[in-house]
Every structure is written in structure tokens, then in C-alpha cells.
Amino acid sequence: MTFDIIGKRFWFFLISGVVILIGVISLVTFGLPSGIEFSSGSMLTVKFEEPVEYADFQQEISNLGYTDAIIQRTGTGDFLIRTHELSDADKTQIENALTTRFGELQEAQFNSVSPQIAAETAHNAAIAVAVAAVGILLYVTWAFRRMPKPLHYGACAIVALVHDALIAMGVFSILGAILQWEINLMFITGLLAVIGYSVNNTVVIFDRIRENLTKGISTDFEAVVNSSLVETLSRSLNTSLTTLIVVLALFLFVGASIQNFAVVLIIGIVAGTFSSVFIAPSLLLVWDKGEWGRFIPGHKPLKVKT
Amino acid sequence: MTRKNVIAFILILIIFGFAMWAVLPLKSAEAEEDQVEKLGKTGLRFGLDLTGGVHLVYQADFPDDASAGDKGDAMDRALITIENRINKYGVTEPIIQQLGEDRILVQLPGFTDIDAAKSLVEQTGFLEFREVELNEAGQPVYLGDYLAGEPNQFFDRGETDDRIFVKDYLFNDDEEYGVFVAFLTKTEAGIEFVDVEGNPVNKEALQEYAGSLSWIPTRGDNGTKLTGELLDDAYPTLDQSSIASKPVVSIEWNHEGSTIFDEIAGRLHNPDCDSVPYSPTYAIGIFLDDTLLSAPQVCSTAFGGSGQISGTFTVVEAEGLANLLKSGALPMPLKKPPLYQEKVSATLGANFIEMSWMAGLIGVILVMLFVIAYYRLSGFLASLALVFYGTLVLAIFKLWPVTLSLAGLGGFVLSIGMAVDANVLIFERMKEELRMGRTLGAAIEAGFNRAWSAIRDSNVTTIIVCIILYWLGSSIVASAPVMGFALTLLIGVVVSMFTAIVVTRTLLRLFVGSALAKKTKLFSVDWGKKK
């Protein structure tokens, strides 16, 4: 029994390409709304004893002059207000005005980030993602140093990783546009976890290619890649499944406050499994064969098996 | 071989027993009261986002010309001062740390009044005593005098320090009285009105306060200013002298303070308080952070080192002020508002712990069912290894101890899913070897040996990510979630490699000799048949 996954590589490239393209269009159109951790501002969660209508609440907040505020209703009498950085006096004023209009309230949560800290956090998060990518490239290249083209392995692992990160960001951009989701530190944490996870999967498959090449099971690189892929397929799927099970449990039970984290992991695990199985090994082959011409429209295709 | 294996098995049992000892009992006696699940006798250590509490980060406000050494010393003293203030409030395990060169982190678990926490930390707590400036004729100087003639120098040229003007009795209600209006400071060109931050103030805006007295520092005969640094002790008491007893703060001067205070009293005192009316010239102004608390007149010349600060205090405020004075002044002010502030209510946190617990439990059970269904006996052994894994990781969390944030719990739950990975790699490998017609024993050994390079390389990438995340966490202010996640995932990855390589292998080897081993079906060879 043989699945010919590698032979259908251009179909898989197409699927990934379309998904990424949609994500990128959303990223360009809507951007990636960032939470106060990255863009500074204050977030205040208040709990009223009596139920309060969203429209009334929103009107009161904009009466106070916070027309830029984003308001989310998180329960019958629970609201989250997110606006620019509030001073102590501003906060007291808001809470007093709300108490006067809607009755007693409790300040359940308050979080405020100054522009200076937000800039530092965003800067360091970007560095962390970049350093992680370079670190992985170096390690994978080193781990496969005895192979003919070690850098290819590292580079393909990075492409798979960028693929997963792009899909995750694209989905969050769409979620941001539809549900007003914002990315926060938990998103970056989840994204880095996904990066580690995706490479983990890719490396297992590459490891098998390395072993099969050393064993010399075939002189045809394409055959080697394909059988390595098929041999590790049930492992790839089973591992993703067990991880997905626990992340889904996390998403369903813990919910709201680590929603960002759980969702980026779910997307990342699915995209990561796809890229590890269908993209990274195929890319290795495409590079090895020098098939890049296929991607240029009008270029005469090289011999391609389908 | 077999003997070695038995020894390994016994060692595993010992480690497991030790881990169990660390995490049992699952619920401590107090758990029901405070609603938070605990593990073992002392419980796991939970982060602020789970216990509720306040997290503040301040930027110290140093003058531009402060040297690095001065800053370092001032930061050290500031940390001690803040710690003293907070300790008096009985917050359990507060964290007060220096971040970078000139930032201060304050974490108060379980303390959810963020406004109280902020005023506790932010108050500079600088206590000083002042007297009223007199002109050449011996009459009190008012703000109006400086505004009217627009003089180019101080009336009392002997005193060159800043004058302070505060709202006087015309604004005499509890809220306004004594509030800072302006400084009058000496410049190269002459004298100038400035605000707290040193910015020039428009004279027009000050006209309203023309009746405010000009307060100058009061000094002992040797020129030492009378400030809070000369205090020995401060405590709240009730002043019984008036009709309704009111809260005041009693103070004790140290030796130097006692001498200076008596010298000043000798100079300022009203010779006959009962018949000579109150006049600003007899008053001593008590200022805290540039706000006038009260300005009693001095009626005695010998105080014997003790005194009283009265004002419009409640009992709680008097207690707070006494604590503030005792813990001393901050060596430098802190910028407001804080760079970062976060408050989490305790009820939210307790819910998260319950729910994460639930998610972890359900996740583990589902994962076990899956591996048992797919890998049969090996899956069952892997499940045992997973129980071992979970117990060991929790024991490490507890004994380290790791502070678990919500993200940390997430990392732990995630690592459960990933922990099975090494087992899956090995089992898949074993199945292949069995298909090739090897004996079970040989298949197990080959499975482990061949899977090792994949397990190693794939886990190293996760470890790289964990280390980078940990760095990210340590470099930013809102660090708890990121660092917690990185640490729990790292522990999880390392322990999972250990359990897969050592525990599962030992368990499998124990089965090789048994009758069960003959039934290779138990290892589910035919699930992925037809090679």
C-alpha cells in the first residue's frame, strides 16, 4: 500500500497558498488588532448587581467622552471597557458615573499599560519570534549536518513554520474583524509554542528521510521522501490528535481568558500538521530537483509526475 | 538484562512513591474554605492571575544628573522602604523587586484594592516641618506680598530654600485645606514660581491664593532642617484634649531631633497660649509630601522628644500615616501613573484553577482512551507512564517551587498531549519492527533505539522555543504568563523524554518474559497492516 503524497505536492501547495492568501488579504485589509499589552491603554471590567443593557452602557461611556472605547459585554451585568490609558482620576470618574446611573458595581479586573511598556513588549516579542526562527534554522541545519544539503532541511523547516504563523495570524485577523478579537501576549506565547510544535513534527519526518537515505532504500530521492512520509504518517496524525484533544479540553473548559492561547494552538496544530506532512518534505524535494520553474507562470514545466 | 530491568523498575517505583508523597493529599483541609484546589500539605504556588491581587510596575523619577551609583543606592533604599510599608498591611508573600536600572515591581497576591495599594507605594512619605517667613518688620509674609511688589528676592534673605504656598483657611474644608499651590524658588535671575514638577507657574493663576502664608524650612541652631529623617517612632493615638477625642499621630524624635525641636520651640513659642491669640508667627507647619497637614501653635519650649501630628484624620488614616512615617521617605519620587498596573479579583482566579484542573483531567482521560484503543497493551503501559508523568511534573512544580499562572497551567495541560508523543514514536517504530518479523524483545529494543534520534531532535526544538520564551518573559514587564508557560512546558518536555525512554521501556521489558508477550495482537500489529 502506498499513498503518493509527494506526487500530489502541487495540489497541497495550492491549498496552502489559497489559505495563506485569504489570510494575507485580511491582514492587509483589516490588520491585526493588538491588545493593550502591545498598543498601550487601559482595560476595566465592571460587574453590576443588576442587569444592564449594552446600548445604555455604551451611551453612558460615550457621554463621558470615551468615544474611542471598545465595549464588550461579558455577562448579564458584566462589561469590559478598553480605552486609552486612564489616570486614577479618570477611572474614579467613570466608576462614579456608572454607579450613579446603573447602581452598585464591582471592579472585577483592571489592567493598564503605558505606551513605553507597550512599545518594549511589542519590540521584544518581535525579537523573540525572530530569534526562535533563527535558532531553529541553526539547530535543524546542525542536526542534519551529515546530509548532502543540511541548509535545505533547516530552510524547509522554517518555511513550514512561517506557513503556520501566517495562517494563525490570518485567522486572528479575520477573528479580529468579525469578533473584535485582539492579539495579546498569550497569542505570542501560543504562536511560539506552535512554532516549536510544528518544527517538532517536521523534524520527525526529516529524521526518517535521513535514516532512509543512510539505509539507501532507494536511489530516487522522491521515493525516499514519500516512503519516509508514509511510514511516519500515523505517528504524525496520532501525536497531533492527542495534543489537539488536550487543547480542545483547555478551550472548552477554561475559555475566555486563555481563548487567544487555545485558539492559536488549535489553528497552529492543524496548520502545523498539514505543513509538516504536506509542505515541508515536498519543498525539500522541489528544492532538490530545482523545480522552482513550476511556480513561474508560462515557464515550461520540468518533468513532473502526478 | 532482566535483573537490570528489575532494578530500574524498583527505582521508578521509588521515584513515583516520592512524587506521590510530595503531591498527596490532593486536597488539603483548608481547600474547601478558600475554594482553591491545593496539592499536598502546603499546596501549589499560584500566580497573581489565579490568586487575585495587584501587580504594579513603577518608573523611578531621578534627576537627569543622577549618577548610576546614586541611582543604585536610592533603588535599594526604596525597595526596603516599600517593603516596610507593605509588610505592615499583612500581605502574604508580597514581591518587591527592582526591574532593570530604575523600575520597581510590586506584586501583592490576594490584595485586590488597587487604589489603596497604589497610594501605599506611591506616597513619597517626606515629612518636614516649616515655619512662616517673616519680613524685616517681623510680620508674616503672604503670597500676595510676592505678587504685588514683584520683588526680585526673598523677604528673608537668610533662608534661600524654596517657599511653599498651600491653600489656607479660606479653602478650609477637609478636601482643600493644606493642598499645595506653588513653590517659590531661587533662580539665577531672581525668584520664580514653579509647580511640583519644576515648571514655571503663571502669576495670574496665583492671585486667588494671595492670602496663603509663605512657609520656609525650620532649622535648629546648627542649620539642620527638621524632617522625618530625625524620627525614631510614630504611632496612632487618640487626642483626648478636645471635646470629641480625635485620631492623631504621636511621634518620638531621636536624640538630634529632640534637641533641634526644643531649639525651634524656644524660638517660636507663644509665651502665653491661654491669653495671647493664635498667630502664624507661633505656628509650626507639618508638611507631608508638600501638603500641609496641620499648623499648630507652639505652646511649650521643652517637648522632651515627643510630639503630636494632628489633622483631619480618620482612625485608619492616622494608622496609615504612622506607618508611612515609620517606614521612612522614598529616596526619590515614582512617576505616576505606574508603567503597568493590573488587578485581578480572587473569585475569577479560583474559577480558572478549577476549570484548568477539569480540562487537564478530561484531557488525560481522553488521551489514555485513545492510546489504549490504538496501541492496546503498549497504550495501556503508556497510560501508566502518563500517570507517572503527571505525578512527577506536579511534584516538581511543588518542590521547585514553580509559580503557576494560568498560562503555566495551560502549558502543563498542553505538555500532557505532547508527552504521549515520544511513546507514539516508539510504538510506531515497534510495530514496524514487528511487521518485519522480529521477536517482541528485539522489536522493543529496535523501536527505542531507532526512535531516539527523532525524539531528541524534535524535543530540542521545543526546548529552544522554551528558552527564548523564558528570555522574552524576563525582558518584559507583563512577564508572568510567558515565563510561566515556558517553564512548565520545559519541565514537561524534559520529564516526558525521561518517562518515555526510561519508564515505558522498563514496563515493556517486564512484559517481554511474560505469557502476554506471545500474543502480539495485544500490540495491535494488524491495525496498520498490509505493508
Image (tube, coloured by chain):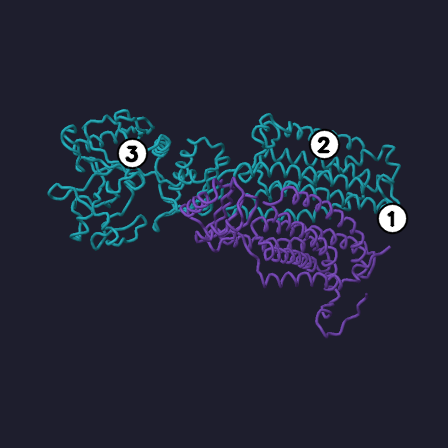
Chain colours: A purple, B cyan
Disc 1 residue type (three-letter) = Lys
**Residues at discs 2 and 3 in contact (Cβ within 8 Å):** no
Between A306 and B373, the one lying in front of the other is B373
Amino acid tagged 3: Gly
Q: Are marks 1 and 3 on the same chain?
A: yes
* Residue located beneath label 3 in the image: B311
- Of residues A194 and A141, the one nearer the viewer is A194
Determine the secondary structure under disc 2: helix
Left or right: A288, with B222 as reference point: right
Task: Tell me the amino acid under the disc marked 2.
Answer: Ile
Same chain check for tags 2 and 3: yes
Residue B313 x, y percent position in the rendering:
33, 33
Q: Does residue B174 sit above or below A30 in this rendering?
A: above
Residue contact between numbered discs 1 and 2, judged by CB atoms under 8 Å: no
Residue drawn at x 31%, y 26% is: B238
- Residue of label 1: B529
List the residue tagged with mark 2.
B12
Q: Quadrant of the N terminus of chain B?
A: top right
Dot 3: chain letter = B
Q: Position of residue A205 (x, y in %)?
A: 75, 53
Secondary structure, mark 1, is loop
Figure check: A117 above or below A284: above
Q: Residues within 10 Å of mark 3 (few under 14, many from 20)?
A: some
Residue B501 at what x, y percent from top left? 73, 40
